[in-house]
Amino acid sequence: MPQIKFYSRPAVPMEMHKVKIVQQLNLLPIRERLAKIKEAGFNTFMLHNKDIFLDMLTDSGVNAMSDNMQAAMLRADDAYAGSETFFRMRDKLEEIFGIANVLPAHQGRACEHIIAQHFVKPDSVAIMNYHFTTSKAHVTRLGGRVEELIKDEGLVTKSDLPFKGDIDLDKVRACIEKEGVENISYLRLEAGTNLIGGQPMSYENMKAATDLAREYGITTILDASLLQDNLYFIKVREESMKDKSIREITRMIADLFDIVYFSARKFGFARGGAILVRDEALFHEMEDLVTMFEGFLTYGGMSVKEMEAMIVGFDESMDMDVISQGPQFINHCVNALDSLGVPVVTPAGGLGAHIDARQLMSHIPAEQYPAGALTAALYLCGGIRGMERGTMSEERNADGSERIASVEMIRLAFPRRVFTLSQTEYVIDRVKWLCDHKDLIGGLRFVHEPKTLRFFTGKLEPIGDWPEKLMEAYIRDFGEDQ
């Protein structure tokens, strides 16, 4: 959708929908927010949703459904085996991606589990443009390792490079030659790259990378969870694709890969997932893992009502008017923060706005989790729940030392069709206030640290009394009731 022009003022993102159902929000007074973040161990994952004003933790499973999606849920066939709902979903996925063999799973990490169980062996290497937390954890749990071969410029937070998720082809070839083809479990490309700002890949790079893998006989896998955003960016940023429809681009991408998987908590606007396997023999080799870990092959751990909603959501994900709104709202937020001097990842990617906590919180050592501290501070000073995407989200090295993340960010996700422009302006205002009071924010340390995926359920404590000092500064400017 081209941005709608305004006659009397600068253009702003326009919602291409009307609101028919609302859910009331609650903004706790700041002293109560301080108590809540302390109870949560300064980990926003551990907050109760009732204590949050704007939930920007993720877009996973919290996107707003359309009227057509909700209506579709009423036709669900809840048979344990042979559900017609599954066959409708399978047919829709084949229509869009051109792959007939579909393995259902309850969400994206379940897909990753099944893929890793089949392909990953001890000491094997999974090549990725960049990892996602769960995609890496599934590999390392089985004794494999991940090689992240994104182009160096992809890790430069502030730039104008349109496709910062592109993989470095020279690095890929060098890795294959060094490790040996027999030791490469697969090439996984994530479109777009979640942990570096939702940055997209170009079609040209995907094609070159999969051609290279095919030259060596290496299995190619697409993580399509964030595909809808990536499709938007290919359409508007890649010159050779501007005359293609979203459906045409999707099919061209799918044709490059042996396996396509996704979380429908993102792609499809519902709650579920699926693995699409091109080769029928490989499909049959993997199907027993679904029945063992997920459920029967025609529901895979999903609610059939959600599956019916997904079918409609897949079609909506092929609509440029639908998939453009998220990136346009994110772009508005990023550009506004950038103009106010807040260090953000540019150009704006998908999924959410990303603040460069390494730059903003440069006074906090990396081992004290600057992005985690900033995330807790934003909840304290706005009731806004974001997500740490930095060193806290990494796993420790084998010797117990911290693995310092390549990028240290706080992500402010924009669930689709959820937030209004005025709520976005509130977020911009509170982030700017925090930026101007950044020196009051200190570090964190773990008091409960799970071995794997610690950022989900770990608990921390502040180093010093900085939350109280930050709260007092906030009260001076806004009062106790906000």
Image (cartoon, helix red, strand yellow):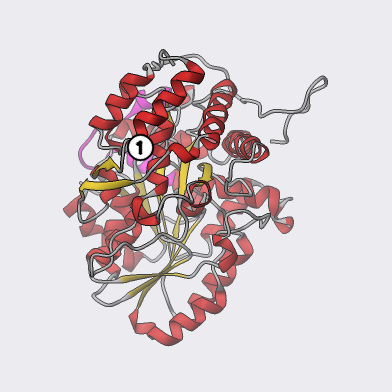
Q: Position of residue 133 (x, y in %)?
A: 35, 55
Drawn side of residue 188 relative to residue 450, left or right: right
Drawn side of residue 477 relative to residue 111, left or right: right
Image quadrant holding the C terminus, namely top left
Depth check: 117 or 124 in front?
124
Taking the magenta stretch, the answer to whether it contains residue 77 is yes
Q: Where is residue 289 in the image (x, y as percent from the top left)?
A: 22, 58
* Prevailing secondary structure of the magenta residues: helix
Q: Which residue corresponds to mark 1? A: 271
Image quadrant holding the N terminus, namely top right
Q: Is residue 329 above or below residue 411?
A: above
- Check disc 1 and report its element: helix, strand or loop: loop
Taking the magenta stretch, the answer to whether it contains residue 438 is no
Q: Residue shown at 47%/42% (left/top)?
A: 411
Residue lying furthest left: 292
Q: Residue shown at 21%/50% (left/top)?
A: 449
In the image, the segment drawn in magenta is 69-91
Residue 385 position by quadrant: top left
Q: Can residue 385 be seen in this view?
A: no
Depth check: 108 or 308 in front?
108
10 Å crowding of disc 1: few (<14), some (14-19), many (20+): many
Number of numbered labels in the structure image: 1
Residue lying furthest right: 7
Q: Is residue 62 above or below residue 86?
A: above
Q: Is residue 213 above or below residue 459?
A: below
Q: Is residue 7 above or below residue 270?
A: above
Q: Residue shown at 69%/48% (left/top)?
A: 236
User: Callout 1, which amino acid?
Assistant: Arg
